[in-house]
Every structure is written in C-alpha cells, then in structure tokens.
Image: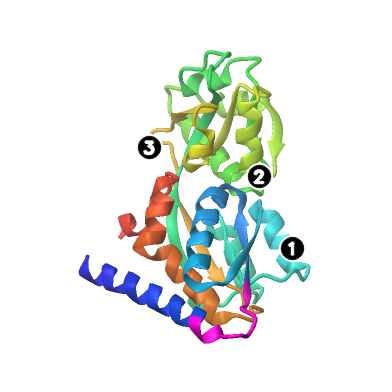
C-alpha cells in the first residue's frame, strides 16, 4: 500500500513538473483512441490528467475494429485503449505499437442489458431463447460481440439450456452493432428487449434507464483491457505518464466506479 501511495505521489509530481517546464511553449496535446465503452471512465481520467499537467487530451471513442482500421489507414494517435487484446495484438504484430508500454489496466465480463421496465419480462438467460424476443449483439469483430458468442456456446454446452440454445438466441438477434454504446442506448430506448454488453456498460449515466442480468462465472469470460502507446506518438513521455495515471490508484478508483475490475484486483 505504501509503495502504491508513493508511486501515485511520484506521478503527480511528474505531471506537475511537465506543466511547469512547459513555460511559454505551447503544451502538447495527447490523442487517445479509446473503446466506446470506456468513454465515461476515460473522460474522467483525462480530466484528472489535464488538471495535473495542463496538457489537453483529445479522445476518439469508437469500437475496437474501427479504431484499428483508422490507425492502419494512417490516422494519428498517441495511445490506444481497447476492450481486449485481439485488436491490440494485431496492431503490435503490424508494428504500430510500442510493445514496452502495453499494460493491462482493467478486466471486464459480459452481462445482459435490459430496458428498465423490462416489458418482455426477461427474468433469466433462458428467456433470451424465447421465440420473438428482440436481442442486440455486437458484430463478430467487436469484442463485446465475439465474447457474447463465447458465452452462448458455453451455455449451449450445459444441459440446463440445451445444445440448440445458442442457435435459438442467434435467431432472435435483430441487429449487430459496431459499439457497445449503441447496444445499451437502443435497449434503453426500448428498441430491443435485451442486449449483450460488458458489465461496465451499465455506467452511472445509464442508471435509471437500463438494468442487467449477470452471467454466472462458469458461463462468462474474463476479458483483459489493454492500453499502450503507438510508435508514431510525438509525445512519448506524456503518453507514458497518461498510462501511469490510468494504472495508478487514482485512475483505478475511477475505473472501479464505472464497474470495471481494477488491474490491482487481478494481481
């Protein structure tokens, strides 16, 4: 605990030093490409970084496949934070990421999101297979999409749900979305009866608009969330300080508030 406090103090001092040494020179701006479901937590962490350093943080929130494609097509970013390692590792293999900076900053798991008043009366995971139920899911390339499919396969392997459970739920999919934010928003608006998202996607801003059904651990998947600096970054020191803030006790407290599992809890 004492080491973590010292590290947090050291980070704050480093950020303050960056701010004072900037003098009359224009401070750099960090561009962070970030998974859409991280918007609440990272906007708050970005404000903490800006307050301590005086450096502006500009976020580009989108689904991981879209962020990866933008980087591959030449878009500039200093940092990438996304919902699992699939797209991060692809960019690492392609030479876009400074591998020494990559860290797991949180963990997440899947959940089923429902409209607040639950008009379809979905009370259990079994109800998702009921004919006529309107279900939303991410695209096969979106982390929340392919992990939802993993969950369905696990459920179908349990005799309680039956081997045709996955097919029945997939038959009820009315739309495959490119971000988890769209899934949650559409469910909140009553455009679907349920949607697969990460547990953290029922953020404080969505309280009173949606509810959720937790998925038991034996069917769920634990998903590590990585952050890393890109090789193209013109502000390597500032990017590393942002990563340090995200994994500091202060940053982890913000993530926990948004129902992510902090990296410290996985140690």
Q: Which residue is mark 2?
A: 179
Look at the picture and state if 121 lies above or below 182: above
Quadrant of the rendered structure where residue 167 is? top right
Element on which disc 3 rests: loop
Is residue 198 visible to the viewer in this orientation of the structure? no
Q: Which residue is mark 3?
A: 218
Residue at the image point whose x is 40% and y is 46% from the top: 257
Q: Is residue 161 left or right of residue 265?
A: right
Is residue 15 visible to the viewer in this orientation of the structure? yes
Q: Which residue is mark 1?
A: 70
Q: Nearer the viewer, residue 253 or 191?
A: 253
Question: Could you tell me how far apart the alpha carbons at marks 1 and 2 are, in whole angstroms?
Answer: 15 Å
| Residues rendered magenta in the picture | 20-29
| Residue count near mark 3 (Cα–Cα under 10 Å), binned few <14, some 14–19, many ≥20 | few
Q: Residue furthest front?
A: 24
Of the 4 image quadrants, the one containing the C terminus is bottom left
């Amino acid at each position: 605990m004492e080491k973590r406090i010292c590290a947090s103090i050291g980070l704050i001092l480093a950020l303050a030093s960056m701010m004072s040494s900037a003098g009359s020179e224009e401070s750099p701006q960090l561009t962070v490409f970030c998974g859409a479901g991280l918007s609440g937590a990272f906007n708050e962490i970005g404000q903490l970084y800006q307050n301590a350093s005086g450096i502006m943080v500009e976020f580009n929130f989108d689904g991981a496949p879209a962020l990866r494609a933008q980087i591959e097509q030449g878009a500039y970013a200093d940092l990438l934070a996304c919902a699992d390692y699939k797209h991060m590792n692809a960019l690492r293999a392609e030479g876009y990421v400074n591998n020494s900076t990559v860290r797991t900053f949180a963990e997440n798991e899947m959940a089923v999101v429902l409209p607040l008043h639950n008009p379809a009366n979905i009370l259990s995971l079994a109800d998702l297979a009921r004919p006529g139920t309107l279900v939303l899911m991410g695209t096969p390339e979106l982390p929340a999409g392919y992990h939802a499919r993993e969950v369905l396969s696990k459920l179908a392997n349990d005799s309680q749900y039956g081997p045709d459970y996955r097919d029945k739920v997939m038959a009820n999919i009315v739309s495959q979305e490119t971000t988890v934010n769209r899934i949650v928003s559409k469910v909140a608006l009553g455009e679907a009866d349920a949607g697969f998202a990460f547990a953290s996607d029922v953020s404080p801003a969505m309280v009173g608009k949606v509810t959720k059904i937790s998925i038991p651990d034996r069917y769920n998947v634990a998903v590590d969330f990585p952050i890393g600096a890109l090789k193209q970054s013109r502000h390597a020191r500032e990017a590393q300080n942002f990563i340090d803030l995200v994994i500091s006790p202060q940053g982890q407290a913000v993530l926990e508030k948004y129902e992510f599992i902090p990296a410290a809890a996985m140690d």
